[in-house]
Image (cartoon, rainbow, N blue to C red):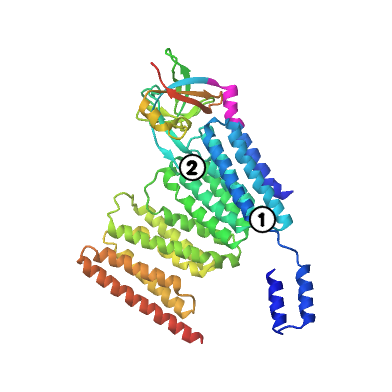
Amino acid sequence: MKKWLMPALQTIFVALLVVSFYATSWFGDEYLLRAEPYDPFDPFYGEYVMLQYPDLDAPAGIRDGAVYFTLTEGDDGYAVIDRIEERPFFGAINGSKYDRRVVAPQLENFYVEQGRGPELEEAIDLEVTIDVAPWGSIRPISIAPRSE
Amino acid sequence: MEWERKLAQWRAEGLIDQETAERIRAFETRQPKKRKLPLLLIIGLIFFALAVFSFIAANWQAIPAIAKVGMVVTLMWIFYVLAHFSEKKHFGHPVIFRILGYVMFGASLIVTGQTFHLGTGSSIVPWALFIAAIAHFFILRHSAFTVLAFISGITILTSAAPGIGLIEWLLFIAVTLAWFFLSKDGPTMIFSWLLLFGSGFLVWNLWDIDSPLVPIWVLFALTLLLLLIPQDKHKLLSPLYLIVGGIQLVVFLAIRGESDMSFAELTMPESIALAIAGAAVLALAYFRERHLMWLGVLGLVGFMLFDETAIALAIVAELTALAYLIIAQRQDQPLALGFVYFIVVQFVIYVIYAWERLDMSLFFLIGAILLFVLSGIAWWLNRKKEGAVT
């Protein structure tokens, strides 16, 4: 029986990881973010687009480093920062601020089909759809060139 | 069959009599026939597997996320089932199938991470692999999982280093300490000790400090393990302490000799504290493991780093190397480690003080002569020792 313990536990772990991502979509809200890319490659995970978000600007008075923020939909349909604090609060996305720009680890890179990275990089103006759970976790859903 | 042809030949030459030939024939026909897979079937299976993989790869983006993860998890189960039958039916090596199953677990985490855009900064994957490898080790007690746990532990330290938090750091130390104490196995204690030593370096990231003495503090902190482990394990770990201590002294000598150390923050109170800690380590080693008394020398490094010429460090490195060799020679202990340390010290001192003062060709000529002479001394010492033994 002992020999089946590890594959069983490992399967449960992978299942929990997958469910945690789906739960973000089941219980969360969808946001559309303006994004700008650059294009590296990870030997294990494959090709991804590194993204920065021009609308996610920190207000004055917030220091560089760890920040906690929530999103809200702006007038033009793209998400902007709703509330940002230097201390954690429930429902906040964990991120970091550097030189006014705010980013969260899961928003920084978006894995794409092999060879699609340069195409998205050329498009420059991109939009990313994400789901944000009420407890603050993020699930990136899709990436596409922006038409505006 | 080959044996029938040889049997007939030996019988014809009169090497064996008819009765022996019959007994050999009876014995050979009783042997179980080896079941070999036909070559064409093997080639066919390889091509089939390649075709399946290329089909999956070509349609990877079209496959639903859950199916991608499911496929790799299924592969993981296939290897664990193969390990089970390999054990029962005595074919192949069960541990290799289990390692492949573990690797497939890693692959399933990577596929999940890629499919759901898990951030590359996340340490979930190396943590899961670290815990899984340690759990495999405790269930199977196989050293392959020691190596796998060490590799995944190093991955946690390197991937988490930029933004590691205090809780994650303490958790890593707690897990590694538990592995160290519960393993009761030589190689595992060495690998877990190395991870504990590596985790000490994260102090630089955690508190954003510029002290160059952190590696020595970590080594001194690890000497406390001597109070908690049985005497027979002291013998196993003491060369590790000495090797790491020797490397640290040589690295400090090289850095101080070749740079002004403007990147580091040297303070007298910390140097005094290190000297006191060095004295404590000396006392601890005196009562628990006398070979480790050499580590006490590192307590003086804080003071010696204030000397911009690095002469104090060079003298201490030279004296410890010579003294270690002489004592080891007298006590009839192995000289190899001591001699390697001695040669490295000579070359670091030679490079620090001769590199900019000599013409390049002269630098290499004298270096080669130095190496030749040192090798000669090593050979002579070894010969003398062998002579004493015989």
Q: Give the image location of residue A132, x and y in percent.
A: 53, 24
Q: Give the image location of residue B19, x and y in percent.
A: 80, 81
Residue type beneath disc 2 = Phe
Between B66 and A1, which is closer to the camera in this rendering? Answer: B66
For the record, the magenta segment spans A19-29
Above or below for A8 versus B390:
above
| Quadrant in the rendering for residue A56 | top left
Between A103 and B1, which is closer to the camera in this rendering? Answer: B1
Q: Give the image location of residue B213, x and y in percent.
A: 39, 54
For the question of whether residue A65 can be seen, the reply is no
Q: Give the image location of residue B61, x and y in percent.
A: 52, 32
| Badge 2 and badge 1 in a common chain | no
- Residue A22 is covered by the magenta coloring: yes
Q: Which residue: 37% across, 56% down?
A: B271
Q: Pointer 2 and pointer 1: residues touching (CB < 8 Å)?
A: no
Residue that badge 2 annotates = A44
Q: Which mark is residue B61?
A: none
